[in-house]
Image (cartoon, helix red, strand yellow):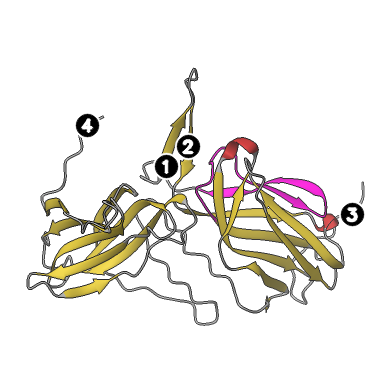
Amino acid sequence: SKPQNAPAWVEALTLLPGEPTEGGGTSKSIFRIRVTQPAPDYQVLFFRLFFDDKPNQQPELIAWDESGTHILRSGTLGVGMNLPSSDSVLIPMTGASAIDIEVPGDGKTIRAAYLDWMTTSEVVHPVNAEHRDVIPEPFSSVPTLHAPPEDVENFGTVTATLAADPIRVDGQTQESAAFQFPIEAQPLTALLTFEIANPSIDAPPEIYLNGQDIGPVSLTLPELADPGYRGEAEPLTTEMHFHYTGWLRAQKIVPATVLKAGPNDLVVANGVGSGSSAIRATQIQLKYIWDKSDYLLRTGH
């Protein structure tokens, strides 16, 4: 492959000395990236940071102007699940000349950064549908999944949140995400949806419903050029397996025959060799008959 060179609009990357602590360590590390706008109409910078999302070592992005004034602070990135991850921030660069990656500790949790300039265009939204903030990120255009705080009914389909917050799943330590939810009547079909961080792309989590293994979820994968893919090879093997170090959408059609009126038990679990992951915004959609449902009644043969 061709050697990678920084674009001309990246002027410098420096590691600023951190403040020492009493124990001889470093309280925080700062990576400073100086940039210049390649054209006047390039005013928003897309910044994706790849890092190990460790508790109490979560990074923050800070944009500065030439006078040393803060223009933007991203706030803490990540959720502290102790997993390889990535987060994206859109930074208004009018007047900004430098971006700091500030992270507690020696800075070894920072793995990489991907930068690109964004252009603006007019976007239209449907008036009578849920508003979705779709920001076309490089390599992927799937919007962030939001978990509704209350059950929502739309066109005969009920959407219910099982858990909004992140939950860790690990096949090695047998950590799984377990949910119990009641339903009033058996639906025609159902769809389980959540976001997952650091999944093994060739061995996604298995779903168990009421004691039955109903199979693995399907992942909505970005193109393979995405820097979020991280390879892993074992000794004496030539095959490389990949995890995606970011959040992906996962879905699974749930057979209606496995659901029952009353309480239902659902488990999301990783296989033993799949490593650790985390899931969030877990929700289920239940489709019922509706007065305008479109269906065919097939005659017997």
The quarter holding residue 122 reads bottom left
Q: Amino acid at mark 4?
A: Lys
Does residue 159 appear to the left or right of 39 in the view shown? right
Q: Of callouts 1 and 3, which one flags the residue occurring earlier in the amino acid sequence?
A: 1
Q: Secondary structure at mark 1?
A: strand
- Where is mark 3, residue-wise? 299
Residue that protrudes farthest toward the bottom in the picture: 127
- Where is mark 1, residue-wise? 229
Local crowd size for mark 1, using a 10 Å CA cut-off: few (<14), some (14–19), many (≥20)? many
Q: Residue at x 86, y 63 (%)?
A: 260
Counting from the top left corner in percent of width and height, residue 70 is at: 18, 74
The verdict on residue 130 being magenta is: no
Magenta stretch: give its range.
196-220
- Where is mark 4, residue-wise? 2
Q: Of callouts 1 and 2, which one flags the residue occurring earlier in the amino acid sequence?
A: 1
Local crowd size for mark 3, using a 10 Å CA cut-off: few (<14), some (14–19), many (≥20)? few
- Where is mark 2, residue-wise? 242
Q: Of callouts 1 and 4, which one flags the residue occurring earlier in the amino acid sequence?
A: 4
